[in-house]
Amino acid sequence: MRPDLAVKAMAALLWQAHAKIAKALQLSKAEKLWEYAPFCLELFIFASMKGPEEETLMRRCFALARLANGATSPNPMVGALIEYEGRILGEGYHRAYGQAHAEVEAFGSVSPKDLIHIPKSTLFVSLEPCCIHRNTPACTNLIIREKFRRVVVSVRDPNPEVNGRGLEILRKAGIEVLEGVLAEEGRLLIAPQLRYYESKRPYVLLKYAQTANGYLGLQDRQLSISHPLSQRLVHRWRSESDALLIGSGTALCDDPRLNNRLWFGGSPLRIVLDRRNRLKRSLHLLDDSMPTLIFSKGSAPLSGFRQTKFLPYPQMGLPGLLEQLAERGVRKLLVEGGRQVLQSFIAANLWDEIRRGSSTRSLTEAEAEQAVPAPQLPPSAQKVNEFQLGWDRWEVFRNFTLNLF
Ligand code: AOF
Ligand code: ZN
């Protein structure tokens, strides 16, 4: 039995006992009030347990939402479940852009015999239900039609076409609405969309690996720093990103493929900043095997590509570049270096998160002479998480000057 239901049952027993005792002792009205004390205490405990119960179920919505990490962009990840008397009747999540919303998936998973309970059920959703018909019909219509008793939401949809209207429509239809459950975590889940609607640019995630003595690598050749498990993790991060950006220095030195080979899901759009038109046709990045954007000087310096596009490097610099990417639907941008590119994002304060892996590997003094130092962490970087993976220590920093968290 659920603990909060057990308390409810206890409170009911106390209530009955109280009535009998009061009658037997023929207590006065004032004395009777005292009899309420234990009952009130139990009710208080019950009420205070309701919060964590809601948080537990909302956490489950977040976990469901994250199952589609990388597949929903430019739309947010969303998870939902339906609760009836402590039982989860159904759950679901928005699986991919253009497909059914989390609420529809959750409702669709309810077994036919449980459908009669819907009018007494609570719908938990990590995001405010939509009230517009775009790729799919408005979720508010489904919720009203099926007569849900209550809707519990973590955060509002930052899309100005929805932003609070979904909740208002539900309230007007007589549905009890609670918003703001685990709002901080809910905002993190939709950080790329919040960043887009707030700043018209993608959420920028800088990632780099450094040696124990703080170097990214050598000037002219690739250095193997990270543990194989870290490489796999980085591919996972690639699968969760819409685009992956590097500078021409890294392209020439490492000749990377910049795709996702070590994790499930797809690969991001490849982006190279090549302001001096230094890229060579023989590089993996110019193999035309997947969508690639090269920001170069003037019009296309090379031709004959199908999936590779050359665009002039924007006069506005990084802000202009990010605006262009946002217009192309990029909501989450992973920047994988090198030093110059990483440092320019940091200098312009155009970053939201930094993931830094520090290896136990060190460079020799001779190697260090022609090595590239890791970027300088800005004072605005606040560490929010760290973990060990093989011989690497990963640290996660967020930019708290940007008003997103
Ligand atoms: C929800 N539940 O699971 C998702 C929502 O028609 P679409 O898919 O393009 O989405 C239109 C709006 O719905 C947009 O504001 C987006 O933020 C929101 N996504 N809403 O109720 C969901 N994925
Ligand atoms: Zn919806």
Image (spheres, grey):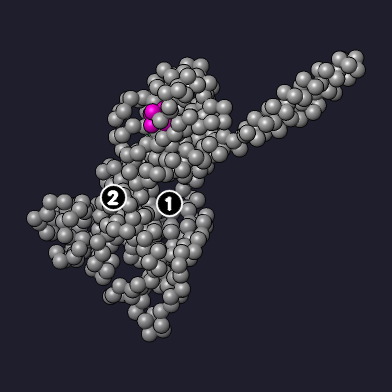
For the residue labelled by badge 1, is the local secondary structure a helix, a strand or a loop? Answer: loop
Mark earlier in primary sequence (1, 2)? 2
Q: Which span of residues is magenta-colored?
A: 103-108
For the residue labelled by badge 2, is the local secondary structure a helix, a strand or a loop? Answer: loop
Q: Residue at x 43, y 19 (%)?
A: 146
- As for residue 396 lying within the magenta part, the answer is no
The crowding category of the residue bearing disc 2, from other C-alpha atoms within 10 Å (few below 14, some 14 to 19, many at least 20), is: some
Residue kind at label 2, given as amino acid type: Gly
Residue kind at label 1, given as amino acid type: Asp
**Which SS type dominates the magenta stretch?**
helix
Task: Judge whether 228 appears above or below 179 on screen.
Answer: below
Question: In this figure, which residue is indicated by the disc labeled 1?
Answer: 352
Specify whether residue 381 is in view: no
Asked whether 247 or 1 is in front, the reply is: 1
Asked whether 112 or 152 is in front, the reply is: 112
- Relative to 59, 312 lies left or right: left
Q: Nearer the viewer, mark 1 or mark 2?
A: 2
Task: Judge whether 64 appears above or below 369 on screen.
Answer: above
Q: Residue furthest front?
A: 113
Q: Position of residue 152 (x, y in %)?
A: 52, 30
Quarter assignment of residue 101: top left
- Relative to 308, 191 lies left or right: right
Q: Residue furthest bottom?
A: 366
Specify whether residue 16 is in view: yes
Q: Residue at x 51, y 16 (%)?
A: 174
Q: Position of residue 110 (x, y in %)?
A: 43, 28
- Kindly indicate whether the residue at mark 2 contacts the one at mark 1 (C-beta within 8 angstroms): no
Q: Residue at x 53, y 34 (%)?
A: 180
Question: In this figure, which residue is indicated by the disc labeled 2?
Answer: 266
